[in-house]
Amino acid sequence: MRNKKLTLLEMQKMKKEHSNLSWITAYDLPFSYVAEKAGIDMILVGDSGGMVQLGYETTNPVTMDEMILLSKAARRGAPNTFIVGDMPQGSYEISTTLAVSNAIRFIKEAASDCVKLEGGKRVASTVQAIVNSGILVMGHLGLTPQSTSSFSGYRVQGKTVSSFETIMEDALALQDAGVFAILLEAMPSLPAGQIAKQLDIPVYGIGAGYGVDGQLVIMHDLMGFYQPFRPWFAKCYVPQVIKDFELYVAGLENVRETGRKTREDGLLKLAEMAVSKYIKDVKNCSFPGEDYSYPLHENELEDLMTSKYWKA
């Protein structure tokens, strides 16, 4: 179990030493408790909770009040874990004043450690304003769910020279604006890895392959709790640990007594095992691997290598 929060210095050290950071989403007390007990490095209270927890069709309807409620619950379950509060659509685009005000809500009301927001150059001034107010900010590039209409839906990013260069320039702009890290979503491994390699700050991925500095997954995907769809890059870990769970239960001298004393006789323990297996796979670089990374065809790679930002 984690007994102290990860620091920015430790994140930088992990990047330098090529030690992958593991993080996961959680939107309530039970799952954040499980994540911390399993030893996760970081938790994201994402606006994805609007879909997997609240039942919205997209993340767009999620409100600040809902995000604060989810973030408060996650903090209660994981008091010793670095928690990222996700700023929902409409909470930061209208003005820098509103953005700073809402970012402060995450820190004061939910005890989040930082905020995350989507966009590159277009939000650089907003990022700088929040950073100047003393709040840590994480960027989010690639497929940004709050603006999927501009991508014609949920489409893989960074596969063309134009898309790759736009993301790279946005990443550099965010780094200059003061973000401490960037999350890349839905990109093949090689272009995402180029961005991670060329930035001084940590670059993490959700569906961005194996070349980044750490991996994020949605808890509900990892546990198989979300029915409508599962992204290509998401892996359900329950089949990986179910036999271990069965052996664990079979080895208990008194299942009822264990349940009464520790509550480790059911889904809480199964979820902890699944998250622990995920963390182990991230640390030893077996997840995501090729099976859970978006493919890049040879002709697409040849084109990307002509980019002014591509380095050998």
Image: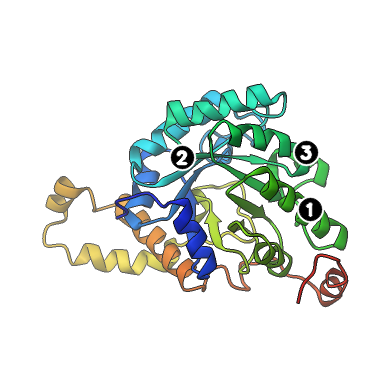
Residue 58 visible at all: no
Image vertical order of residue 11 relative to residue 120, above or below: below
| Residue position for label 3 | 122
Tell me the residue at 52%/31% (across/down).
67
**73 on left or right of 179:** left
Q: Between residues 139 and 63, which one lies in front from this camera angle? A: 139
Q: Give the quarter of the image for residue 279.
A: bottom left
Quarter the C terminus occupies: bottom right
Q: Between residues 302 and 165, which one lies in front from this camera angle? A: 165
Amino acid type, residue under disc 1 in the picture = Glu
Q: Which of marks 2 and 3 is nearer the N terminus?
A: 2
Amino acid type, residue under disc 3 in the picture = Arg
> Residue 169: which disc?
1
| Residue position for label 2 | 113
Few, some or many residues within 10 Å of mark 2 (<14, 14–19, 20+)? some
Image position, residue 229 (x, y; %): 62, 50
Q: The residue tagged with tag 2: helix, strand or loop?
A: loop
Q: The residue tagged with tag 3: helix, strand or loop?
A: helix
Q: Which of marks 3 and 1 is nearer the N terminus?
A: 3
